[in-house]
Amino acid sequence: MKREQTDVLIVGAGPAGLAAAVELKKLGAGKVTVVDREPEAGGTPRLCHHVGFGIRDLHRVYAGPQYARRNVAQAAASGAIIRPATTITGWGNGRTLTYSSPDGLGEIKAQAILLATGVRERPRTARLVPGKRVQGVFTTGSLQRFVDQYQLPVGHRAVIVGAELVSLSAFMTLKKAGLDVAMMTTELPQHQIYFPYVPMKWLTMDLLNRVPVRPLSRVTRIFGRKRVEGVEIRRLDTGEVETAACDAVVFTGDWIPEYEMARSGELTLDGGTRGPQVDGQFRTSRTGVFAAGNLLHGAETADMCALEGRSAAQSIHDFLQNGRWPAASLPIQCAAPIQWAAPNRVTAGEKAGELAFYVGEFRQNALVEVRQGGKVLYGQRYGRLRPNHVMRLRGDWAAGIDFGGAPLEIGLAR
Amino acid sequence: MQDIYDVAIIGAGVVGTAIARELSRYQLNCALVEAKPDVGMGTSKASTAIWHTGFDAKPNTLESQLLHRSYELMETFVSEAGVPVERLGGLLVAWSEEQQQALPGLLARAHQNGVTDVHTVSAEEVYRLEPNLNAGAWGGLYVPGESIICTFTLPLAYATQAVLNGTELRLNFPVRQITTEADGTIRLQSDDDRLRCRYLVNAAGLYSDEINRMLGHHEFTVTPRRGELIVFDKFARNLINHVLLPIPTAITKGVLVSPTVYGNVLLGPTAEDLDDKTNTATSAAGLQMVWEKGQAILPQLVAEEVTATYAGLRAATEHSDYQIHLHADQNYVCVGGIRSTGVSASMGIAEYVGGLLAEAGLPLTPKAAFKPVKMPYIGAAGIRPYQNEAMIAANPDYGRIVCHCERVTQGELLDAIHSPVPARTLDGLRRRTRVLQGRCQGFNCQAGVVDLLARETGQEPRRLLALEGER
């Protein structure tokens, strides 16, 4: 077993991890090592062969693979060590992690650790969609690998489960592979697609004109012998049932953080995001261990994850300099229809940081508040709240928190 | 290929493969005939994966006798062949007065079946053994011998040892017609192939009644009994320490909650009689019922992610005991009605069937050497290749993890594709290595695995993905 040391160990070479590595080197951190379990670094954008990447972090528009390559090249040029095909297998004492790789087993001792392990879509089984176990059932992620990475056939006619931003990625991938898209289904009253990038608006409008969206609908059964032959769709309001013939079903969205490392490291998880709890400085509950990117929130676009990685780098650098780790912090809980918020802890004497949050319902002209006990600490009004879309609350409201008091709560004004 | 086999065994499930393995120790030419493209694809692959002691079998039945004998035989075999098992012990928990009152009867039955280490435990003891159980347990019965086993590896291990010792595995051979030739040999006809044999064993599981009828017998009819199950994430594994078995009562049949040898937790099954022997679909009602019962037993379980759901069909008959019959005049042994205990009784059944064939006149002369088998280890309790420094040093493919959820390496996938009973389908690869069976269900690795299998076996991806060929 090899034994190594590094100043910062970053787990996950996606947008957040690589951006953090670049920033850490810029700030003068010593040895920065980025490991990734995939044979190639770059993270999820490697798989997304469409444009729309890099807007807010790099102020340019890239296609996914191009964006991933650029991030990897920049991190390598900055002097960070990038090690793909390296799987973290467990936690040793303190901040030591064990790994497995084609070069053998080893352990890396770090001064600080950043977890940036990302997120995945819940597969059909985790959504308990009954029926036959057949070929032709995808998530957006597996579909993109079939079509773009391996040029494998994915069928002729598809149903997309979900109607949010990532569903648009699935749609584009299916069209590229020459499939007809029979319909998109969503359990919400309307689709949740928005336009993170203006040229995508045209594409989106075109899509929505051509593909029927079934609102308030759930796929309740998959049938077929060896391959999907169709799905059964049930209206949640009327109970009406229809069947759609298709030989591919794509389950999109319904994110679950890749929390395996966080949980095996016994970090405190957040009930809303299910990722590790972090404060505004991306500190987890374990000293010297930070987290950033979509591990904290499923799912934010790649550019925002990269910006988060950069911010986390600053906090990590501060920790390397002064070794300080705060004792007092308060959790932020969510009241329905807010589903999750991240960061989800506030540390005494610090700004809360901008909060990302998800809401479960469409709302017009809504006032979102942060409260403690009965006291409203901060409020921000939104013209429109859209589910499955990261909303943001400004981060300059931390004054007035009683750190000996009740947990904070984010919710709509009562 | 032989012109005439000494013995043909129809059905390469856990029972058929065990019989083939047993016969392969003798100087015989045997064929193991299977309708599907792989071994272990029927009832065997979708069971509850418990290695039963047979403590609750009906006493003085053939099932009870063979379960008891099989347990002894399997103890040696599973360790020699490297079949993943964990000897956890079983705990039956009584959740009502009625169930509590059933415990002494179950204890007496266990003793009658020769399983003498079973004992009752108090409610306090139940919670000491299983601290995460829901409140409300009255007491329980502890069965030290109940264990969990890899039901994918077991039939593969039997089949592999049979093949290593000369058995011919004839896959994609659905038996359509059985006739007796003028010279007394038996002819099996499939859609596009045929073979002849001197002795015939019917271990066709769900289809054993149909094969039996082709030979003119009507002792039983198989009714497919569907069982639906839910597999929870590995993070649920630490919630329980034992196989939690239900106590059957007049009113309800409960579900079991059991760790799996892969480190997950299994919940189920339902029991529902169907008429379609191919209906392995899960249902909304079935999954919901299992979920609710699981929640009532172990509330924290359902807070974890679901990794997989599946449904299996057991071969139930109108009889309560196994339907194993020798028809000496036809040189034919029927092995039917093995219900839900095939995995646990497999070696006992195989030995018994060997005896029946000898009784019918088949000479059983041992071979000079019976080659052993060692299977790749896919359990969670031991060391897997990705954790093995020496294996990785010898071949870095054992350090190239393809399936992150189950930590399956490129080396293991290639081994499975090029093994004596090779994986030719995605399902075959899944059962041999655990690939695609983890929490992401192929989000990360599915496309790469299809690509690898297609390249290594020279098959068209369209066929592997069921986009062409038989649908």
Image (cartoon, helix red, strand yellow):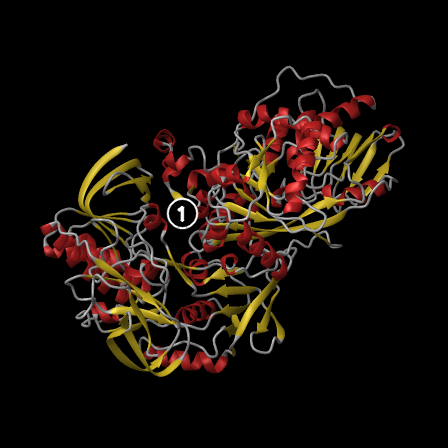
Viewer-nearest residue: B5 or A304: A304
Residue drawn at point x = 30 percent, y = 37 percent: A103
Residue B80, compared with residue A336, is above or below; it is above
Viewer-nearest residue: B322 or B194: B322
Q: Position of residue A294 (x, y in %)?
A: 32, 61
Chain of the residue under label 1: B
Q: Which quadrant of the figure has residue B357? A: top right
Q: Position of residue B105 (x, y in %)?
A: 70, 36
Q: Which residue is mark 1?
A: B404
Q: Which quadrant of the figure has residue A236? A: bottom right
Quadrant for the N terminus of chain A in the image: top left
Residue drawn at point x = 71 percent, y = 35 percent: B57
Q: Position of residue A135 (x, y in %)?
A: 56, 57
Viewer-nearest residue: A239 or B370: A239
Q: Amino acid at mark 1?
A: His
Residue A139, compared with residue B193, is above or below; it is below
Q: Position of residue B270 (x, y in %)?
A: 65, 51
Residue A145, compared with residue B331, is above or below; it is below
Left or right of A258 on screen, residue A329: left
Residues packed near mark 1 inside 10 Å, few (<14), some (14 to 19) or many (20 plus) = many
Viewer-nearest residue: B103 or B447: B103
Quadrant for the C terminus of chain A in the image: bottom left
Whether residue B30 is visible: no
Residue drawn at point x = 47 percent, y = 75 percent: A188
| Secondary element type, mark 1 | loop
Total marks drawn?
1
Whether residue A252 is visible: yes
